[in-house]
Image (tube, rainbow, N blue to C red):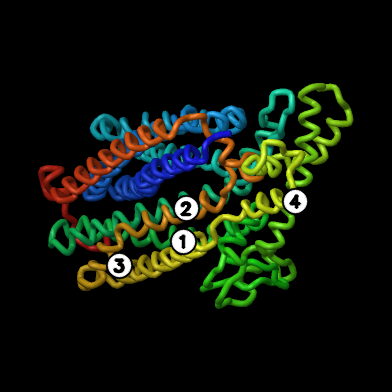
Amino acid sequence: MIDIDVVSLARLQFAATALYHFLFVPLTLGLSVILGIMESVYFITKRPIWRDMTKFWGVLFGINFAMGVATGLTMEFQFGTNWAYYSHYVGDIFGAPLAIEGLMAFFLEATFVGIFFFGWDRLSRGAHLFVTWMVALGSNLSALWILIANGWMQHPVGARFNFESMRMEVSSFYDVLFNPTAQAKFVHTISAGYVTGSMFVLAISAFFLLSGRNRDFAKRSITIAAAFGLCSSLSVVVLGDESGYTAAESQKMKLAAIEGMWDTEPAPAGFNVVAITDQQNHKNLFEAKVPWLLGLIATRSASESVPGINDLVAKNAQNIRDGMKAYTALQILRKDGTNVEAKEILKQYEYGLGYALLLTKYTQDIPAATDDMITKAAWDTVPDVVPLFWTFRLMVALGFFFIGLFAFAFWMVVQKRVETSRRFLLVALFSLPLPWISSELGWFVAEYGRQPWCIDGILPTRLGASSLTTGDMWLSLGGFLILYSTLLVVELYLMVRTIRKGPEDYFGHHPAPVLSSAN
């Protein structure tokens, strides 16, 4: 049995490094596409200002890209160091998309990033435009394969347990690849990255206008950011709805916890806008609902109910009991792999095997677990409702704020009034950190809501960790925090220095002016 303190520290370390890493990822996703858009305009118009815009924002992209690579590579090592049994148990499935990401996406992106910076005077305009879009493609493909791996952890499909190897193995890579949870996470995540890139360009351009510098440069940058940001923020909300639908299909407990819904309601269920939760007594002390909304989002119908936490706990208790039968059959097969009856029992109740492993928190003799142990293990499948409930709502509120801000920015562009409203420019500038906050909240909801599972319904988190000491964990955690904090400080320093210098200092001249703001 692994000391629970080690598991907690391993979770804390991975959470900290992942959250640090994701400070760089969304900006890489967003800026890569914005660079492609800007250079496409340059290719069409041949106006030097669009080339200068692509180069300047490309410098900021390059700084961020380098830091993202540094934090991402070290983060993946933790699967082997801190989560050794997890890697052993599901490495055949989880490792495949990670390997493809490195071979297909990362090397594609890294190769073309170098050509992007050093190919301006060596390639034709069309060839360099192709390179820029390949950078964007590589960034998005990288996110795709990472999210396929993560989506499988949320909704494990296309794999089955092999009692002979005592591991999960791929049964259909097609199902792993086209996992609906992974696909929904991918489009939702990259849209959030596009919002981040758009907000970055909008905020920095607002800074230039507030400073009275680079007016033509900033106004055109705001035009791109406003249009792309409005489309992206609308996509985030729409595709977030799709994520809610897939969660209702495959992660019912997570959805019920996010919504603070303890009891199953008659269809269609109402959406709790505000709730005061008493998790110890499994009820809400107060709640304010929007009728029908949750049912329509989660089921796309007015006739299907959304199960509440209490009913799901009762179902999970039965899953645990069925898993105990599978566990007993597995013990027989480990002694006699030809036992036909045990094979049939394992096949029939295999879905509950992971639930039976939840009992290891209370006993080492799973087949002898008492009803009280089963009840406790069933309630362990409920994540903390309060942080999930409010984190989700803050994330949603920020999403609607982004829509409003980009819509107003787009209207200001159309009205040619971008420079006239200092209040708008200040709001845009001080909104800069909000997309990062929203993205981190989203990952908190996704990962914290999955607890107590490493792989939902298959492997409890507490069983996936390596057999390390708390001293080992504290040492590595401290090292990672120092390293990642240093990289973050370096990133901020380089970004701020580049922005303060501005395009005119970077190019040694003021970006090429244009005669008409309509260009």
Q: Is residue 69 above or below residue 276?
A: above
Quarter of the figure that contains the N terminus? top right
* In the image: residue 186, left or right of residue 488: right
**Residue labelled with disc 4:** 371
Q: What x and y, as percent, mark residue 376?
A: 66, 52
**Residue labelled with disc 3:** 413
Circles 1 and 2: CB atoms closer than 8 Å: yes
**Residue labelled with disc 1:** 391
Measure how far apart labels 3 and 2 are at the Cα level. Answer: 35 Å
234 and 368: which is toward the camera: 368
First-in-chain label (4 vs 2): 4
* In the image: residue 439, left or right of residue 306: left
Q: What x and y, as percent, mark residue 3?
A: 52, 37
Circles 4 and 1: CB atoms closer than 8 Å: no
Would you identify the image quadrant in which residue 419 lies? bottom left
Q: What x and y, as percent, mark residue 178?
A: 63, 42
Measure how far apart labels 3 and 1 are at the Cα level. Answer: 33 Å
- Dot 1, how many residues are within 10 Å of its Cα: few (below 14), some (14-19), or many (20+)? some
What amino acid is at disc 4?
A: Asp
Question: Closer to us: mark 4 or mark 2?
Answer: 4
**Residue labelled with disc 2:** 444
What amino acid is at disc 2?
A: Phe
**Residue appearing at x 13%, y 58% in the figure:** 213
- Dot 2, how many residues are within 10 Å of its Cα: few (below 14), some (14-19), or many (20+)? some
**Residue appearing at x 66%, y 28% in the figure:** 167
Measure how far apart labels 1 and 2 are at the Cα level. Answer: 8 Å
What amino acid is at disc 1?
A: Thr
- Dot 3, how many residues are within 10 Å of its Cα: few (below 14), some (14-19), or many (20+)? some
Measure how far apart labels 4 and 1 are at the Cα level. Answer: 34 Å
In the structure shown, which secondary structural element does the residue marked by tag 3 occupy? helix
Would you identify the image quadrant in which residue 325 lies? top right
192 and 118: which is toward the camera: 192
